[in-house]
Amino acid sequence: MIEFDDVQKYYGDFHALKDINLKIEAGETVVLIGPSGSGKSTLIRTVNGLEPVQDGRLIVNGQDLANRKTDINRIRKNVGMVFQHFNLYANKTILENIMLAPRIVLKRDEAENKKFAMELLDRVGLADQAEKYPAQLSGGQQQRIAIARSLAMKPKCLLFDEPTSALDPEMIDDVLNVMKDIARDSNMTMLVVTHEMGFAREVADRVIFMADGQILEDDSSDTFFNGEPSNERARQFLGKII
Ligand code: ATP
Ligand code: MG
């Protein structure tokens, strides 16, 4: 459902993604790791068109994002994204944050929209916070709301860019547990940039290691953690973060 075929991405003259070939099947959970500046954020941002690619083919839900004629809004309906810094609407309540996109983009019926938003709030353990504003919640709570907000669109695919790296340690597990539930209980495709190797070991189907804009290793989670990555830099990196 996501397929990179010799994808090249440039920022001006800088070659940020080099010959990316990658296929992610529907329902798979893939963790993306690598040193700072290796292109992890760039790669996942190409999947919902936040970053255009310059060459190759990038097929998401059957449409080619490398083709200028592709309707990016149609892709974004099916591809949600959760950022490091939550990006909730500060002047809207939690419930409104979750109901907004389905109302505007999907024209979902108001009663049904509210019912589903409350179900999602319950699922992330925050049903009692519906009428509060983002600033009244902790970082971990805000991130769970951001996840609920993405789920409200019923996407086929969810992208996470270091969703726990801005959080205090005691809040990280609450967010990871919500992500684990989604990975296990839904058929959603998940592409997750994270250095939380416990999460990767537990729920990832595959682990991808990037450096210098290239994919150097693409292993099953089992091979990555219980065998050994064949790439030397991936081995060194793993040694440092575990
Ligand atoms: P980190 O772990 O620090 O988040 P990353 O792996 O996510 O790093 P990217 O943010 O994808 O790395 O950046 C990859 C490379 O592209 C870096 O060298 C970065 O400086 C460069 N880059 C990223 N965004 C831009 C931009 N908008 N314009 C120019 N160069 C950029
Ligand atoms: Mg990044």
Image: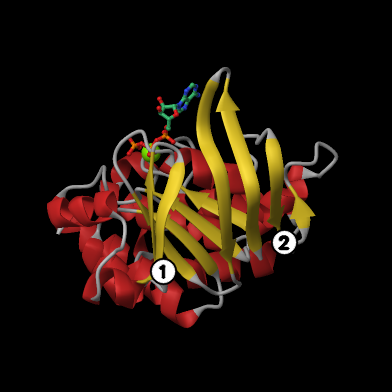
Q: Residues within 10 Å of mark 2 (few under 14, many from 20)?
A: some
Judging by the rendered image, the residue that carries numbered circle 1 is 206
Where in the image, quadrant-wise, is ligand 2 located? Answer: top left
Amino acid type for the residue under numbered disc 2: Asn
Question: Looking at the picture, how far across and down is residue 107, in whole percent?
Answer: 77, 56
Residue where numbered disc 2 is placed: 61
Say what secondary structure mark 1 lies in. strand
Count of marks, rendered view: 2
Residue 24 in which image quadrant: bottom right
> Residue 71: percent from the left, percent from the top?
80, 44
Q: Which mark is residue 63?
A: none
Whether the residue carrying mark 1 lies under 8 Å from ligand 1 is answered with no
Q: Is residue 205 above or below residue 211?
A: below
- Quadrant location of the C terminus in the rendered image: bottom left
* Tag 1: amino acid: Arg
> Residue at 14% across / 56% down in the picture?
239
Left or right of 240, for residue 218: right
Contact, mark 1 vs mark 2 (Cβ under 8 Å): no
Residue 10 visible in the shown view: yes
Residue 160 in the image: state x and y as whole percent: 44, 53
Some atom of ligand 1 lies within 8 Å of the CB belonging to the residue at label 2 = no
In the rendered image, is residue 88 in sight? no
Report, in whole angstroms, how far the alpha carbon at label 1 lies from the one at label 2.
20 Å
Tell me residue 49's x, y (percent): 65, 41
Identity of the residue drawn at 57% across and 44% down:
19
Is disc 2 placed on a helix, strand or loop? loop
Q: In the figure, residue 218 lies in which quadrant? A: bottom left
